Image: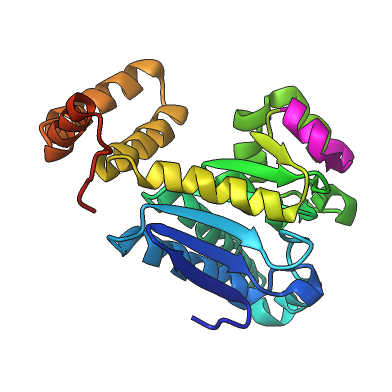
Amino acid sequence: MDDKVLTIERQDAVALVTFNRPDKANALNAEMWREMRQALVWCDQEPGVRAVVLSGNGRHFSAGIDLSMLMGVQGQIDDSCEARKREKLRALILELQDCVSSLERCRKPVIAAISGYCLGGGLDIALAADFRYASADAQFGVREVDVGMVADVGTLQRLPTVVGQGVAREMALTGRDVDAQQALAWQLVNRVLPDGESLRAAALDAARLIAAKSPLAVRGSKQVLNYSRDHSVADGLEYVANWNAAMLLSEDIAAAGMAAMTKQPAVFRD
């Protein structure tokens, strides 16, 4: 992991994944996209990690895709055959989409702790987290329409399920920025904290609370929530019935029951 652009720190069962280009407002260059995916794969596979906090070093979460990366796309996809050029561009878009979707594929819950700019690609990433906290100075925006393109890495697919169709369309079609209090009113974020320090503390507290629960139950709840969001109620009910038929008879239930009877904190295996 190249810690010049992204860092991972363990605090007990919580992984702190941090964008680390503060001098560039954590604009997302090619390395950051790839290393974010690598980091989330590691978090998913590391048994001792039970929750993830994703944030940005410095004032901003992320100002979106790095302009130098956009400027380099033409050279990256260049081909004498127009169809092959388009095929390469499609593959690049799908690759970026996959990097963002790594947050959803990670079985461990991901909390986005957002301060300052959360724009364009930064918002794509934040929306793929399980939930979002913000500091009072946070700004959110779907900026792609301002540069003459359609957002293509996940915002148009995920934003309506978070804030509803009307708000999502207003944000996407106007390109207007949204401040933290408006984001809270629209349920884009769950909480607004006064500053970056209290934001990080609140996100870490939530992650630790999750990490204290049954890992099987947490991982299962995330997967069932993701599946149910994308399917009918009937399909979701059948899915959770199948899940619990396979996973319900766990040692975690016995541990939770014993903890309730003895009024002691439950201790669960990873």
Q: Position of residue 190 (x, y in %)?
A: 64, 34
Between 23 and 100, the one lying in front of the other is 23
Which residue appears at 80% of the width and 55% of the height? 117
Instruction: Give the residue at x 12% y 32%.
Output: 254
Q: Tell me the colour scheme of the image.
A: rainbow
Instruction: Please tell me which residue lies in front, 205 or 185.
Output: 205
Say whether residue 180 is magenta: yes
Q: Is residue 138 left or right of residue 245?
A: right
**Is residue 95 in view from this perspective?**
no
Q: Residue 238 in the image: x percent, y percent?
A: 26, 21
Q: Is residue 218 left or right of residue 93?
A: left
Q: Position of residue 171 (x, y in %)?
A: 81, 36
On screen, residue 38 above or below 79: above
- The stretch of residues the image draws in magenta is 173-186
Magenta span has 208?
no
Q: Nearer the viewer, residue 99 or 83?
A: 99
Q: Is residue 117 visible?
A: yes
